[in-house]
Amino acid sequence: MSNQILIFLLDTVLGLFSLALLLRFYMQLLRTPSYNPLSKFLVAVTNFIVLPVRRVIPAWRGFDLSTLVLAWLTQFIILVGVSNLKGYGLDSSLISTFIGFGLLALIELVRMTLYIVMIMLIVQAVLSWINPYSPLAPILDGFTRPILSIFQRYIPPIANVDLSPLFAIILLQLLLMIVGNVQQGISVMF
């Protein structure tokens, strides 16, 4: 019972922190407006660890590598911690275990990214009907424009209804299935 509580707390707290780091990374990468309350919140929540790590891991070609590495490291800690709390012992080969957990943490970041984009597509579609001038609109547009523009080139609006979010969500679901299969394959290997 106490292990289940610890697993829940570890997964929830560190999972939310990893999500905040990943969102911060993508907001900087996509150059979304920094004056938005969500941007300010993410910076305030993650600055305590990002700023010291930036001294060690600098940015590279517009990529805030320190934030991305911290998100990966957080997922790695979650996987190792949950595995230990569930009673799975680390096998004798520490290097292969480290590689396995490292790959699984990377796959988890990809999976989280796909879910972030999918949720943002849904929220953007709903907000476009309810309140298109919401403070979240510039952030959502910054996240979804690269994906939607691909579909909008090939799929014209039908009766002034843009179907590109629907096709983007279908593609994201297919990618999530592929990522799940890769994740299972890596889990079996290590």
Image (tube, rainbow, N blue to C red):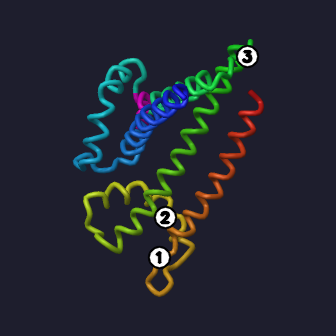
SS at circle 2: helix
Label 1 environment density (alpha carbons within 10 Å; few <14, some 14–19, many ≥20)? some
Q: Is residue 190 above or below residue 173?
A: above
Query: What whole-number distance in Å separates the C-alpha atoms at marks 3 and 2?
Result: 45 Å
Give me the residue at 67% from left, 52% from top: 177
Give me the residue at 29% from left, 36% from top: 43
User: Can you identify the residue that label 2 sits on?
Assistant: 148
Specify which label sits upstream in the sequence, 3 or 2: 3
Residue extending farthest bottom: 159
Residue 27 falls left or right of residue 105 = left
Query: What whole-number distance in Å separates the C-alpha atoms at marks 3 and 1?
Result: 52 Å
Q: For the magenta stretch, what is the residue range?
A: 59-67
Q: Residue 143: image x %, image y %?
A: 42, 54
Q: Nearer the viewer, residue 21 or 35?
A: 21
Q: Which mark is residue 162?
A: 1
User: Can you identify the residue that label 3 sits on?
Assistant: 91
Label 3 environment density (alpha carbons within 10 Å; few <14, some 14–19, many ≥20)? few
Specify which label sits upstream in the sequence, 3 or 1: 3
60 inside magenta stretch: yes
Circles 2 and 1: CB distance less than 8 Å? Answer: yes
51 inside magenta stretch: no
Q: Residue 146: image x %, image y %?
A: 47, 58
Specify which label sits upstream in the sequence, 2 or 1: 2
* Amino acid marked by disc 3: Asp
SS at circle 3: loop
Q: Residue 3: image x %, image y %?
A: 55, 26
Eye-nearest disc, 3 or 1? 3
Give me the residue at 49% from left, 64% from top: 148
